[in-house]
Image (spheres, rainbow, N blue to C red):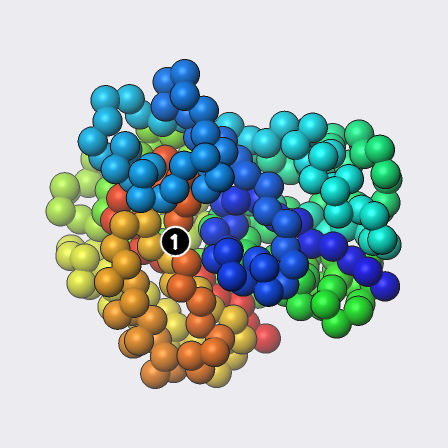
Amino acid sequence: MVVKIVTDSTADIPAELAAQFDITTIPLYVQFGVDSFRDRVDITEDDFYSRLQNGPVHPTTAQPSPQDFADAFDRIAEGADGIVSVHLSEKMSGTISSARQGAKMMKNPVPVEIVDSTFISMATGLVTLTAARLAQAGYDLQSVAAAARDSVTKITLLVLFDTLTYIARGGRIGRAKALMGSVLNVKPLLDIQGGEFVPVSQVRSRNKGVERLVDLVKNAGHSIVDLSVVHSTTPDEAKALVKRLAEFVPMDKIHLARIGPVLGAHGGPGVLAVTFRTD
């Protein structure tokens, strides 16, 4: 049984992991005025964040078109018995709608299972990796899709923002809107529940926020089977956090990833997150 795995660029899966597990990634689009770029294809993370922080135009984002999905599905359909396509929360993007339409437009149709991760970034990535591991092990389409959907219930995500300005501007703030207008030096911690952001708490400093991320992992203990630290613009801080979390989770279960341009347009610089899957 050959099952192919697809996700989108907001899953933030590092390129080496995507290659290792034969994961096809469909890029979303980020736009600065009339200039449109495919996420991580036409613009790098460094170029994007430089333009975000220093340029005069705030970026907007767009989902892949149904044709983008149809073309990608057709490319990998030959020799496949099915495709499992895992994407960011349907409440935050029309990407899943495009994937569904794209599946109907395929010239070389094979069964396609669309999975709403209900998350973003490497939380989506961990759902995708769950599916990819089973696909590599030879499981059938329904088993892979079912395992991916089941893993959604076992994902935890906690995001430390430097500011909520970017996420509010992009309209993806959800119930965390209640935190807007807080004291400027307060750092918000957000979770995603039911596909949208919800406030967890506020901390008075960046260091206290990092400690909350560490405590989250420490409290989950040995039940963690897959974990990722994700950052937008603070690689040294993220690496230091990985080192600390390795006290509680084996290093071979920890991934280090970076938030790409599309999510970065909504999160801004200084975002640091921990996400994990439990058994």
- At which x and y percent is residue 155? 53, 62
256 left or right of 277 in image: left
- At which x and y percent is residue 171? 40, 29
Going 86% across and 40% down the picture, which residue do you hit?
109
- The residue carrying pointer 1 sits among few (fewer than 14), some (14 to 19) or many (20 or more) residues within 10 Å by Cα, namely many
- Front-lying residue, 231 or 187: 231
The quadrant where residue 88 appears: top right
The quadrant where residue 249 appears: bottom left
Instruction: Tell me if I can see residue 242 in this picture.
Output: yes
SS at circle 1: strand
Going 42% across and 25% down the picture, which residue do you hit?
31
Going 30% across and 63% down the picture, which residue do you hit?
238
Going 45% across and 35% down the picture, which residue do you hit?
42
Q: Quarter of the image for the C terminus: give it.
A: bottom right
- Front-lying residue, 197 or 262: 262
Residue that numbered label 1 is attached to: 258
Amino acid carrying label 1: it is: Arg
Instruction: Tell me if I can see residue 212 in this picture.
Output: no
22 left or right of 110 in image: left
251 left or right of 146 in image: left
- Front-lying residue, 136 or 185: 136
